[in-house]
Image: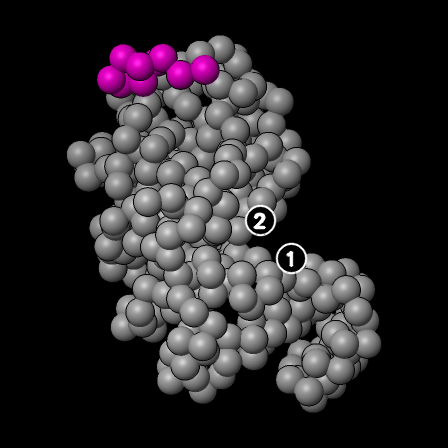
Amino acid sequence: MNPETSLEWPYPRPDSPPLLTPEQAAYTLSVWLVPRFSMLTLFCLLEPLRVANRFGHNLFAWELLSADGGAVVASNGVRIDVDGALESIDHSARLMVVSSYDAEATVGFKERAVLRRIAAHGGWLGGLDTAPFILARAGVLAGHRVALHWESVPAFQQEFPELEVSPARYEQSPTRLTGSGGVAGIDMMLEWIEQTHGPALADAVGRQLVHERSGGHEGSARSGRYSGLSRSVVRGLALMEANLSQALPIPEICRLAGQSQRQLTRLFQRHFNETPQQCYLGMRLDRARQLLTDSHCQVTEAALASGFTQPAHFTRAYRQRFGETPSTTAQRYKTGGSS
């Protein structure tokens, strides 16, 4: 069966490689590979992002780094080429440290200085498996709950008694993310996908990876509200959430979701009391409002980022949903107000 014509084809971009450069993607994850790192942990970090890219337009990119820009050998003996050296990273990057055995053996003052520089600029830092040792020794985990591989917990507590160790598989704050490594990386990335593009996309990616999301993280925002929906509805929602800035036609969403427009409309009305078009429009308007309130961007920028190319249509739809114009929302939040 030709996957391009099959209604069961699960992806909207079967012919488009999902590998993006940082310049192309909305979000980039920089990964510092420490010698003898866990290959399983690396794969569990990257595969959810790769699959998410097949549902949307230019969502995620990743770059691999080493201390000196040279290849790194994993704990299983596989040699991995990287994209650059750790020192070249921008201080605003989202950096994840991946290590396993002998985490500190090759980490020196220069590497710890890079971590401190990112932290000093309010950047995001993460560490998996034994990498929390590296972050803690750089002094960038103060005030944050820490999760790491269970074998390393006693030694970590002895060395850093002032830091709170969590029994969860991972711990997340706005600027730190630590975890036990291995398959916990899938849950961590699914939560990131949910935070940036919505729960339906995260659920759809999890299904494609044949992964049941863990409840082991106390702070997870996942509500389970999509667990009872049919696969075509979840696919439709995921496609909408992944394509807010470049709105897809509803017939195209139905085709990619593997359902006729009439049937998908019936399912949406049953579950949400809305048509797919109404649901999609609401998602895009909600994204615009989030941008206006959280990022203080201009009205035109919020409209374009939410897939609206006609200002009059955007303003009319926004007023109908929120009872005010987008410029009113933008002005209120620029002056420090709240709704």
Identify the image quadrant of the C terminus.
bottom right
Q: Give the left or right position of residue 247, taking residue 18 as reference.
A: right
Quarter of the image where one finds residue 334: bottom right
> Which residue is at a point 35% across and 31% down the rendered structure image?
42
Residue 105 vertical placement versus 46 (above, below): above
Q: What element carries label 1?
A: loop
Q: Mark 1 points at which residue?
A: 246
Q: Give the left or right position of residue 186, taking residue 81 as reference.
A: left
Q: Give the left or right position of residue 156, taking residue 188 as reference.
A: left
Residue 169 vertical placement versus 132 (above, below): below
Q: Name the residue under label 2.
A: 57
Residue 332 vertical placement versus 161 (above, below): below
Does the magenta portion include 80?
yes
Would residue 111 be seen by someone viewing this image from the given angle?
no
Q: What residue type is labelled 2?
A: His
Locate residue 242, reporting x and y percent.
Answer: 52, 57
Q: Foreground residue, 241 or 181?
A: 241
Spatial distance from mark 1 to mark 2, Cα to Cα? Answer: 8 Å
Locate residue 55, reporting x and y percent.
Answer: 48, 51
Majority secondary structure in the magenta region: loop
Numbered range of the magenta stretch? 73-81
Crowding at dot 2, Cα within 10 Å, few <14 / some 14-19 / many 20+, comes out as many
Identify the image quadrant of the N terminus.
top left
Q: Foreground residue, 321 or 289?
A: 321
Q: Are marks 1 and 2 in contact (CB under 8 Å)?
A: yes
